[in-house]
């Protein structure tokens, strides 16, 4: 009897959000040993290779991230699987390249992209006895067809493997501007139902186009629909007044939920996917961080990220589980300055170069599209080292599976086990991999081959200072001599180009 009552009381006390079955399963696997460390992925949005101190940032300080880098494995050739958000997140959670599912940036009312029958990364970890949680940006779609935000929203994060979810559904710049916790909009007043449309105006809230005077900063046409909290968004929204988020409070809202999750699960292995809104647009950092950098809102948002990282590290230390927690700190794609709002990111960037020595950035098939700061920090296990191994977030799936002794499901076809490289025990990572932008690139040793591209890019991209790296001709770069991809060697090396095009096709058709 006692056995049943105690967990029940604990659940009441902590307002048990995680699936209680999972807690029960975990009780049977309650071995906090080095085979089952807690896993925390700190997934920053749009953070460029050189946007943090230890990777060369100027104009903003990131002492907490630098402490992780100095005491962990700091990677110099680690990649998000794609140059935009939805595809990278798809790969992170499924272990497959995003082109296999034609994953592209989703609107805020898109249906769930991941098949609920798929054994995702969190589902695999659950089989190993982990309790799983996601806090922050989702951007992988919700529901089937058009979401009804006023009812239980399903399927969603919980159905693809998270016992607990507290989500910003798509992006900060897309409606609806509300949080969804375990499938329900937080603070929704049923008498003020939410309607969302990406096609036409709904309700009578002011829009950026009609009421520019109400804005914190101006925006491009795509970002000039419904105004919430002084920021015009992509898409229209009516209702849900009480449920609206306050952008300036994101770091505190997410930290609270993340800390509660870790505290509830400190006695059993947990996986926390902490997915930042920062430093994506709209960049409206909390007053505490305004002026912390010399770069305006974008730099201040980086300082805000560093604060969050410090808070999470501190919490793990206070819970006495830091030594038994592996943290992966990284970003979903490369950097961008002007991504739709006039927040002075371009004007104030000064000496800082978000892409470091690499070319391009977010959306780009050049290196800076996917080569992102990546640190593995595990105080009880990992020794400080800098690693130039070729790494891809796609491989976290198979690597964690090997760490926790789980078989790789048959439909996980692209993920490779490189746990020894993630832990800095070897500097041999992948031999080859694809990078995904609007086209594909193949990395093989020092060579990088970029497929020719004959499609069209969206107009808004063409109007911004974004180097897509796309060309109708094949491109071949020797990254050993030409990090910045300036010297296209394709014409001089037709055999290599053919060989790499063939190999790319082989991987696509795997
Ligand atoms: C683009 C948005 C951009 C950003 C991006 C998604 C326009 C003109 N631009 O479509 O502002 O929201 O989508 O970024 O609409 S990501 O990091 O989530 O991929
Ligand atoms: Ca992103």
Image (cartoon, rainbow, N blue to C red):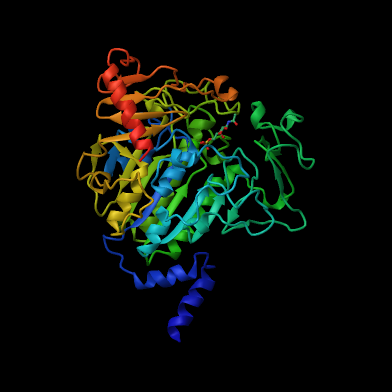
Q: Is residue 33 rendered to the left or right of residue 122?
A: left
Most extreme residue toward the left is: 426
Count of marks overlaid on the render = 0
Which residue is more in the foreground, 372 or 51?
A: 372
Q: Is residue 16 left or right of residue 193?
A: left
Question: Could you tell me residue 283's position as x and y percent?
Answer: 56, 35
Identify whether 212 is placed above or below 509. Answer: above
**In this rendering, is residue 114 above or below 406?**
above
- Of all residues shown, which one is farthest toward the top? 492
Give the quadrant of residue 183. Answer: bottom right
Quadrant in which the N terminus appears: bottom left
> Can see residue 53?
no
Q: Using residue 400 as the reference point, say whether residue 355 is left or right of it.
A: right
Q: Position of residue 443 (x, y in %)?
A: 31, 30
Q: Is residue 158 above or below residue 412?
A: below
Q: Quadrant of the rendered structure where residue 367 is? A: top left
Position of residue 314 measured from the top left corner of the image (x, y, whole percent): 39, 53
Task: State the residue lying farthest toward the bottom.
Answer: 1
Q: Position of residue 396 (x, y in %)?
A: 34, 47
Q: Nearer the viewer, residue 431 or 74?
A: 431
Q: Is residue 359 visible?
A: yes
Quadrant of the snapshot with the C terminus:
top left
Closer-to-camera residue (121/320)? 121
Q: Residue at x 33, y 42 (%)?
A: 375
Q: Going by the picture, which residue comes out furthest to the right?
A: 204
């Amino acid at each position: 009897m006692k056995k049943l009552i105690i967990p029940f009381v604990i659940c009441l006390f902590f307002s048990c959000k995680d699936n209680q079955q999972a807690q029960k399963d975990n009780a049977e696997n309650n071995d906090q040993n080095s085979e089952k460390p807690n896993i925390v992925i700190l997934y920053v949005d749009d953070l460029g290779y050189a946007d943090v101190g230890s990777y060369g940032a100027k104009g903003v300080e990131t002492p907490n991230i630098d402490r992780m880098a100095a005491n962990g494995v700091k990677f110099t050739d680690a990649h998000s699987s794609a140059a935009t958000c939805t595809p990278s997140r798809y790969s992170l959670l499924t272990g497959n390249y995003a082109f296999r599912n034609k994953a592209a940036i989703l609107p805020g009312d898109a249906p769930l992209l991941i098949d609920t029958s798929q054994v995702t990364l969190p589902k695999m970890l659950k089989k190993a006895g982990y309790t799983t949680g996601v806090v922050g940006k989702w951007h992988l779609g919700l529901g089937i067809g058009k979401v009804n935000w006023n009812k239980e929203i399903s399927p969603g994060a919980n159905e693809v493997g998270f016992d607990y979810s507290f989500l910003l559904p798509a992006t900060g710049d897309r409606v609806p501007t509300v949080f969804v916790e375990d499938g329900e909009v937080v603070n929704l007043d049923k008498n003020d139902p939410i309607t969302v449309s990406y096609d036409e105006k709904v309700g009578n809230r002011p829009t950026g186009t009609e009421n520019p005077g109400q804005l914190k900063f101006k925006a491009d046409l795509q970002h000039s629909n419904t105004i919430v909290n002084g920021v015009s968004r992509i898409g229209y929204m009516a209702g849900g007044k009480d449920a609206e988020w306050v952008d300036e409070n994101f770091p505190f809202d997410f930290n609270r939920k993340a800390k509660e999750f870790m505290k509830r699960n400190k006695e059993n292995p947990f996986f926390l996917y902490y997915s930042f809104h920062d430093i994506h647009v709209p960049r409206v950092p909390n007053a505490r961080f305004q002026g912390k950098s010399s770069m305006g809102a974008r730099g201040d948002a980086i300082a805000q990220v560093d604060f969050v990282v410090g808070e999470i590290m501190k919490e793990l230390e206070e819970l006495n589980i830091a030594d038994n927690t592996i943290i992966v700190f990284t970003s979903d794609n490369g950097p961008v300055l002007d991504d739709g709002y006039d927040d002075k990111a371009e004007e104030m960037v000064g000496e800082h170069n978000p892409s470091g020595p690499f070319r391009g950035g977010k959306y780009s098939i050049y290196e800076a599209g996917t080569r992102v700061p990546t640190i593995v920090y595990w105080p009880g296990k990992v020794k400080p080292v800098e690693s130039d191994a070729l790494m891809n977030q796609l491989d976290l799936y198979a690597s964690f599976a090997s760490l926790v002794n789980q078989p790789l499901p048959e439909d996980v076809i692209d993920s490779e086990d490189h746990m020894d490289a993630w832990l800095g025990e070897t500097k041999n990572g992948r031999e080859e991999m694809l990078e995904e932008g609007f086209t594909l690139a193949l990395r093989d040793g020092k060579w990088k081959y970029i497929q020719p591209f004959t499609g069209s890019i969206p107009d808004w991209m063409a109007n911004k200072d974004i180097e897509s790296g796309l060309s109708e001709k094949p491109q071949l770069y020797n990254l050993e001599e030409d990090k910045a991809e300036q010297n296209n060697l394709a014409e001089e090396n037709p055999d290599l180009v053919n060989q790499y095009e063939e190999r790319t096709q082989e991987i696509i058709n795997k």
